[in-house]
Image (cartoon, rainbow, N blue to C red):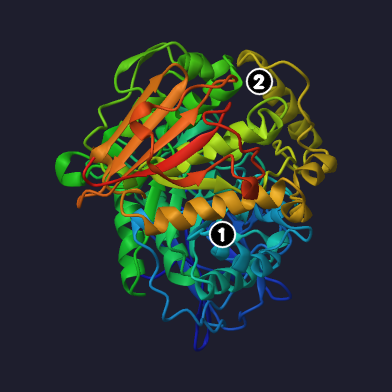
Amino acid sequence: MESLGASLKTRGTEFRVWAPHCRTVEVLLEGHAPVPLQADTGLFAGLVPDARAGSRYRYRLDGQRDRPDPVSRYQPDGVHGPSMVVDPRDFSWTDGAFRGHALEALVIYELHVGTFTEPGTFEAVIPRLAALADLGVTAIELMPVAEFPGSRNWGYDGVHLYAPQSTYGGPRGLRRLVDACHAAGLSVILDVVYNHLGPEGNYLAEFGPYFTDRHTTPWGLGINVDGADAAGVRRHLVDNARYWAREFHVDGLRLDAIHAIADTSPLHILTELAEAAREEAMTLGRPLHVIAESHDNDRRIVLPPAEGGLGLDAVWSDDFHHALHTRLTGERGGYYADYPGGRGLERAIVEGFAYQGEPSVYWNRNRGTPSADLPGERFVISLQNHDQVGNRSGSERLPTLVSPEAVRAAVAILFVTPAIPLLFMGEEYGETAPFAFFASFLDPRLSEAVHRGRQGEFERLGWTGRIADPNDLATLTRARLNHALATGPGHRELREYYRAWLRLRRSHPALGARHKGATHAEMSDDVLVVSRRAPLGERVVLVANLASEHRPLPRALAGATALLDSAEPRFAGAGGEPLAPYRAILFEIARSQ
């Protein structure tokens, strides 16, 4: 099937666009007369001899409206500007030997390109890749990079799904970053948004039936993937998944908020696009993992289609974060109301989901499905991520909410849990910069509406205080990482603690994402005990005091070998006798025990 968009040919550029809402479509090449495209059952296509790589163009719809290409590969002047013809072959990849990582080997590092460095570009990330590989990270996850309005945004307001953000460096910058990641031994997971499009620069409805009032989302009309006229919409999404694998060599896709995608079709759109993306990756000789974000705790997300599932590889488990966060902070507002005192933490560690059908106060319904039998690598867990930091009124990171000792205890619990760990940029050295939502909408009325809307949302969740203005440049500036902290007192030791845990997690057979079924966790008198056992009998036990007072060490561990202790001076710990407040010790247990 011929690709949509602008495809370079030997005699020019072929333009193909799906536009069943239009009677006529013309190509407006800058400096040339309009060229009409030939219609064929909703598709318009034609060859333009004068168009070449670097040419800028628009489509004229019905002789009246000039719009960018819905599958533009590059928007050098932003969401409203002309599209640019890109030659995807005009890049010399050097990653032929890179074979990616197995699902269970993933240690994900989520980063936002615009705030990870001072320049805020794809290429500015490259000098820091070696440090991430040294830390023990195996994959970086880029927050969405599809072209969004203005120069700053979290990325979830993108409207050109095929065009890497121009202010980050466009398609060439992203290719250079991916190639450099592979050279450093790092996989690249791209956060993609298929549940909605941003409100500004979204012209898709003028081309075809992309949206439907049969389904609604928190952002407006639903994406039309299951109507009688949805074939072109489904192609738009499926081809996009293929595109990232084929033209940018990405190793995974993180699908945003799939609970907002309604599809009653015999073949779910997410199953179709996951299979398509994996098929493309196979031609490069490496795996591609599809990871979902969903608040439903639905096991079917990761079950194979033959068992009635979607066939995705893994799903975010927010239960782990929420239960541990409430245990450490005592917060009870919003969705934290479902986890008083850390309720459900042991179950989240051992089984994946804490809520498996029980009634939820926050959701006012029963929530979740059984998960004990699902492998650990089907779950992605975190202490911090963009949502859990940014979607609170003060946008505080964990080190500004709890003590350094509590942070180290949380790190130990994260890494002892049989799941895929995700780190949020900077957490490895205790970054304190708030990560509030920011944007640069060009329409001032929209900017004000977004600010008011988010303020109201936080108030409904029970969080008090004025939020940072998303449209103020200072909101982005404050969110930018201060990498110099990583070498400062307390911060360099925390980074070494993360590094030590990740090194041990790789090397010890009883740790890592696998063998979830041989995991046990119990909380007694504020002391969490997590036991892991490998198939050949190797065993470790984590003991974490989650109280602000001393607790006795379990007698069964007397004489056991300590593999890692959060109170060691090299990690900025105070030493002393176990179990000091928030001290976490990982013990190795002899096979005979």
Left or right, residue 285 beside residue 528 = left
Q: Is there a contact, CB below 8 Å, between mark 2 and mark 1?
A: no
Q: Residue at point 36% right, 55% down?
A: 508
How many numbered circles does the render carry? Answer: 2
Q: Residue at point 63% right, 50% down?
A: 570
Task: Examine the image and state in which quarter residue 320 appears.
Answer: top left
Specify whether residue 317 is in view.
no
Q: Quadrant of the C terminus?
A: top left
Left or right, residue 494 beside residue 3 = right
Task: Examine the image and state in which quarter residue 202 appears.
Answer: top right
The secondary element bearing badge 2 is classed as helix
Q: Which residue is mark 1?
A: 135
Seen from the viewer's position, the closer of residues 332 and 531 is 531
Q: Position of residue 280 (x, y in %)?
A: 35, 68
Seen from the viewer's position, the closer of residues 27 and 313 is 313
Q: Is residue 50 above or below residue 172?
A: below
Q: Is residue 238 above or below residue 541?
A: below
Seen from the viewer's position, the closer of residues 516 and 214 is 516
Q: Residue at point 62% right, 34% down?
A: 405
Q: Position of residue 64 (x, y in %)?
A: 65, 53
Say which mark, if any, is on residue 567. none
